Amino acid sequence: MKLGRRVRLLGGLLLAAAGGLEAQGPVAPPGGVVDRVVAVVGTRALMSSQVEEALYQRYPQGVPTDPAQLRALSREILESLIDDELMVVEAQRDTTIRVTAEDVQAAVDETFRATRARFPTEAAFRAEIQVAGFATPEEYRTWLADDQRRALLIQSLEANRTQDGLIKPVTPTEAEMRAVFEREKGTLQPRPPLFSFRQILVAPKPTAAAKAATMALADSIVRELRGGADFATAARRFSQDPGSAQQGGEMDWFRRGEMVTEFERVAFAFRPGYISDPVESPFGIHIIQVQRTQPAEVKARHILLRPAIDPPQADSARVLAERLMAAIRAGASLDSIQRLHHDGTIPGASNQIPETNIPAPYLTAMNGVEVGQLAALIAVPEADSTRTKYAIVQVTARTPGGEPRFEDVVDDLRRSLSRRIGIRRYLDKLRQSTYIEVRDP
């Protein structure tokens, strides 16, 4: 088995699946060189083949040829492998950390599918798998299982220790962030063009009768829930929120400012277990149950009911949007019209958004539009065609793409480095309490 060929095939995908952690599966030595122990962590040995494999994962197109650089990189990778081994051992000691066979299988399946998708035929896939050193796809799966189990153990330990306060984020200095940026900017993707824009999203309005019928249904559901009906069952039956209905209305933890005002006013006002009266927001009518609270966060579930939209109401949204756009072009204040007509389900302004994150209809309409001008009217479709909305968009700024800049990534860098420093301090404590012998990698 040729190690270089194997990691060229699998390295990048394994890194993606393991969240950036190097794989440590059993490998044969490259070029016929006898494998040897390069470090001992507690009672476990790390082999030179593992350093080779991780090195090729980092440089799948070919490792550096300069001997001094190659030696430094090998030592850096060995230290990373030692860190991984420390985390795996610690996770295995902790009886509260469990990685199930189902968790491992799901991760293996995802990576296997990603690898298979790179090849046009099953025959081509099997041929390359054999070149990489695996006799069959099943053997590849077995190797993946060990790799994914280790990665999941490390992820679980980090989450557990962070929750317990043993891993604490540490705010980095600007100098530290700039140093990391300079060292790693060569690995960053080029900065895409950025757009800033304001918009007025015009949504079709339900009739008074449709809204009254939906409110009556909401009232009846609230009575049933307060009488002991199961909330999750009701959510799966009635809720029209595609993101939470099938999960029984379950939502993630959220802080103030992350939800619409009407929703937050209820969610932050009541104790766990409380079932709200119907609450109207731009999204529709909610029934909210607070589940858990923390000083700055709430976990809740909800049932969303949306009044029906009649075809005449749907068409009136387009007509209104066209009339408002004409008024703005004639000199009317966009801000004033926005306050009166903007649908509150999305922000009225977006700043410095990468074009890769902008929906295709928006991007198509804004391309070529000068700063300060309106784009063509944008139809924003939904699964129910009667709910189609119409966006009036004014381009307020455009920044050309180019090389990544510190100011573009500083927030992400701060979060990432804060986490990395916290983990580093935890690992340093593990190193102090563990026997480690490092030999020449």
Image: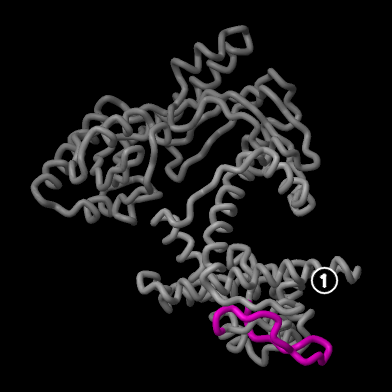
Residue 370 in the image: x percent, y percent? 74, 22
Give the overall secondary structure of the magenta segment: loop
Label 1 secondary element: helix
Relative to 181, does residue 129 appear above or below in the rendering?
Answer: below
Is residue 33 magenta-colored? yes
Relative to 313, 267 lies left or right = left
Residue 428 in the image: x percent, y percent? 57, 62
Q: Amino acid at mark 1?
A: Arg
Residue 362 in the image: x percent, y percent? 62, 35
Can you name the residue that lies furthest to the right here? 66
From this viewpoint, is residue 298 visible?
yes
Relative to 207, 272 lies left or right = left
The residue under the point 52% across, 67% down is 430
288 or 271, nearer to the observer: 271
The residue under the point 29% across, 40% down is 305
210 or 47, nearer to the observer: 47
The residue under the point 68% across, 36% down is 364
Tell me the magenta residue range: 24-43
Viewport quadrant of the N terminus: bottom right
How many marks on residues?
Answer: 1
Relative to 227, 188 lies left or right = right
Viewport quadrant of the C terminus: bottom right
Badge 1 is on which residue? 71
Residue 101 in the image: x percent, y percent? 43, 79
Crowding at mark 1 (Cα within 10 Å: few <14, some 14-19, many 20+): some
Is residue 282 magenta-colored? no
Image quarter of residue 288:
top left
Image quarter of residue 5:
bottom right
From this viewpoint, is residue 118 visible?
no
The residue under the point 34% across, 56% down is 246
